[in-house]
Amino acid sequence: MKRLIILLLFGAVFMQCSPKMSKKNTANVDFRSIVPSPKPAPAIKFGQYKSFAINNGLRVIVVNNKKVPKVSVRLFLDRKPINEGDKAGYIEMTGDMLSRGSKNRTKAQLDEDIDYLGAIFSTFSKGFYLSGLSRNIDEMLEIASDAVLNPAFSKEEFDKIKKQLLSGLAANKEDPNTISSNVCNALNYGKNHPYGEMVTEKTINNVTLDDCKKYYNDYFTPEVGYLVFVGDIDAKKARELAFKYFGKWKNVGKIIKPLPSILFPAKTSVGFVPKTGAVQSVVAVTYPVKLTPKSSDLIKARVLNTIIGGYFRSRLNQNLREDHAYTYGIRSSLMDDMNIGEFTARASVRNEVTDSAIAQIMYELNRIRTEKVPKEELELVKSVMAGKFGRALEGPNAIANFALKTERFKLPKNFYKDYLKNLEKVTVDDIYNIAQKYIRPNNANIVVVGEKSVADKLKKFGKVNFYDIYGNKVKMPAAKGSDISLIELFAENIKALGGQKAVDKVKSLETEYIAKMQGMELKLWEMKVNGEKYAMKMDMMGRTMQSETYNGKKGIKTANGQAMPMSEEELMNAKEASLVFPVLALKSNKNAKLKGVESIDGIDYYVVEVKNGDKTELYYFNKNNFLLERHEIIMAVNGRTQKMSFKITDYKNHDGVLISEKNTMSGAMPMPIEFNLTKAVVNGKIDEMIFKID
Amino acid sequence: MKKLILWIFALFILNTTFAQSNEIKFVEYDLANGLHVILHEDHSTPIVATSVMYHVGSKNENPNRTGFAHFFEHLMFEGSKYVKRGMFDKYLQNVGGMNNANTNQDRTYYFEVVPSNNLELTLWLESERMLHAKVDSIGIETQRGVVKEEMRQRVDNQPYGSLMKETFAHAYKVHPYKWPVLGSMEHLNSASDEDFVNFYNTFYVPNNAILSIAGDINIDEAKKMINKYFATIPRGKYDIPRPTIAEPPLNGEVRDTIYDNIQLPGVIEAYRIPAIGTDDYYSAYMLSKLLSGGESSRLNKAVKDEKQLVVYVGSFPFPLEDPGIHLVFSIANVGANPEVVEEAMDVEIEKVKNELISEKEFQKLRNMIETEFVGENTRMLGIAENLANYKMFYGNTHLINTEMKRFMDVTREDIQNIAKKYFNKNNRVVLYYLPKK
């Protein structure tokens, strides 16, 4: 971190600084003032590898390195990407299932056996990773092959994995970077492409244990596999072990459906994902490219990307971070892939500079196409890349990775040996030429996740389309007005609740909602005497955490057993809360404004906004049924914007009026909390003692 | 979730390293000015790691000038008499090298990894840092701003970022470990330029440093170059202050709750334990494996898998020069009550005290330790640091090849005894991390 900041401060100073030796080293020159010159460059030595296939087609790669008595084994299934459709996630889950017990070992036994050897073992949908002492390699492979070739697929473990995945998704759902990456994928590849589809709560909930079994039976198969041994093991021993533990593994030969074709953007457009209350925008400029690992452009393309956004002093970082201070950092990537590659430049920028930041990204992308890169800059980048390559060669794993890539992509045998030589050959003209091919600012998807209000300023970059967090196109939120007035909306809402007469009849309402979380019960009780009195109590595990009592004149609140009188503002709030339906309070609120129509998760809502100082409240009325279905509160807490959301659903009839039976609260806590109605009494008998204040 | 867990691992990267089976050969010697030099020659990759470890950390600071050691880590990139401001990094980048530095309670460590034909460049830069560093008002002012940002980034803006700071603040009352390595911004603001110059002249001297180099070098050539750049650097003129104060026992559980910008509650138990190098420390390390090494470990199995109370649980002793702490740390699962989590953690610790572990489980721990430390020293940068560490904190560089024996000397009874002796409520701090409202 510190180093980044140092570079931030000083990276901008560009000085000529290639080390040079002074020719005159006379006595009156301090030798310390002379920058030492490098000795002749050392030759890079490459470790060797061996490769062969066994009976069932499983290919084996061995990198022998006896430096320490350890060995690692990786199984990698080089299968094509698969469309998961509405069950996205089952492939990842299958990978997890493989280390959760076999037909011969429970999960606990499997863990115990692996740990006893001091080994490390993890499984993935495309294989496993195993490492430990070379003297234990036989036992280690026995366990690993048992796990992946005889998986138990127990329902209990499946349920645990599902739960974990769902927790992870819920925790990441609001993360703007996750949203940006998901929507970029959807726009670049289309949602029916394996690279464009998305794992959501819904798709995970669709997954059954049988889906995992089916994936395993169809695609966990040796003919697409590589078994990579690295460390203190020779080829002969590796062959024996591969045959012993994986020789009986049967081929399936299932053909994977060809991938849907990709639509390259004909012209640049903006995909905007509104995120209420965001203080930063995540901006990305991205598009698919045709760049495979076998392409003769590959090394040039890497140099090109390093110049643009691939190292700390790259053009994008220099411009957006150092010169303009729009962001803490920006990087770009130009990824090669056997199916379809991708260019992406992404950064989090301050709200108010969203459009300026995009303009600077576009400026840099255009500049590399129109101006030749200065020789010194190219040489610096080559030197940075060569150093990185040299350092990465430390240890046998680098050789194993090179070997695997060479075999998988059928690269020239000397690709990595010649890497530095070919890197050195890249010229200014090469960069200019391939920039024309791979840098396409006029055929890009600009994806912005941010506060809706910044969307207006983005039209200059192309047509602005709006998307939800799942990458579904949604209607553009109306900037002004809608087909209904505020008064009409409230009237419709009252009608929906049961009609004016029925609503008028409700003089009091007592409700109790209970939320159950692991090991805890949260109870929320409220009593409202319309426009007059209000009482609430929140209990956790039977203990009252908070309560409020308002009798029309006075009010007290208690928190953790300590009582305090209500302030003026709190009295006002309590009076408002005493109204049995939110619409009744909104009707008399002068600050309420109809913002327009917004689409969330495919449903259109009329949005009513109430601003009060630092606090903004948004009420979402379903456009079809006029019920209040969402409520958001955005406020600054300790200088930080916090958002609380309520989803108000399951409206049911209680004595002639509709009352929501389910409230899902999210935002202030790690996971949404679901409150379910356990009691609703309309116009019941009122115990005046409830409102007694001493 | 994955991100979170990765981050937690990053938070607790330990500097301790241990013996292994391939012997690391090295030569070591002192220059006349007291600089200790350690050289390891290995030609397998044409790179070299050069490092200088200064025996100064936050515990050497004046209590009214905390944060100095770390502040110097920044200041030392400002340039020197012959290295212009900002050029430290640039010289290294130009040859395709990388460099960085870090500070803890006990030492400050600078390092570079470069293609091996640039060894002399790194020696020149490090000698400039030791002899000629620019400690002037421009650099000090700049770095004040940078350190302030760093505090915001690392402590205020990072989930559980204040964890170390809070844990140490609660675990120590008199020893300098009580203040955070990043120190106090107020202290840094109120310090005079002279304070900084004095600190440099006191601690950044050859007799308080170890130059450790590993990689594709020729020992004789390297010695000549080292002589050229370091031999004429004068020995320090001042005594080097080292804390002598011993922290009295905690004598009673300390509990607190910290509200942070986090998603999931954290439960931290910190037990006071002896310093690195003691027999008890090795036993504590074995205990940490028993509790949280691997999926079959006690805490992982019971608290994470069976009870599903946490998304992460770990335990580790901090490798500190003076008596330190052993953390047992959980991040609760969604909706899990921290009290329930704490209880579940304690159940496992009590079990260790009450029942001697089985021979089989004990053998598992030994196997894990062995695997962990075999192959520990495979990268040049790691070897350079480990060599310096063993010399500085254990006074015995050879431990890089022999430390394994210290672990293997630990018995089942030792593990039980260490739990009984130190893992008690009156010897611990318990912190709850809860989400800010």
Image (spheres, coloured by chain):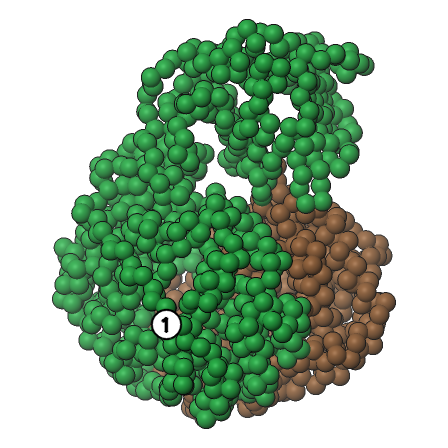
Q: Chain B hue?
A: brown
Residue at label 1? A253
Of the 4 image quadrants, the one containing the C terminus of chain A is top right
Measured as percent of width and height from the top left, residue A277 is found at 45, 34
At 74% from the left and 12% from the top, the residue drawn is A686
**Three-letter amino acid code at disc 1?**
Gly
Camera-side residue of A271 and A568: A271
B198 lies left or right of A394? right
Q: In this view, does A348 lie above or below B325?
A: above
Residue B45, horizontal then vertical, whole percent: 41, 84
Question: In the image, is residue A178 above or below residue A74?
Answer: above
Camera-side residue of A298 and A684 = A684
Shade of chain A as shown in the rendered figure: green
User: Residue at point 47% right, 83% down?
Assistant: A247
A556 sits to left or right of B123: right
Q: How many labels does the image show?
A: 1
| Residue situated in front as seen by the camera: B218 or B319 | B319
Residue under the point 49% across and 49% down: A206
Residue A133 appears in which quarter of the rendering?
bottom right
Please indicate whether residue A1 sits to the left or right of residue B364 in the image: left
In this orientation, which residue lies closer to the viewer: B305 or B135?
B305
- Which residue sits at x=67%, y=72%? A109
- The quarter of the picture where residue B290 lies is bottom right
Above or below: residue B7 compared with residue A245: above
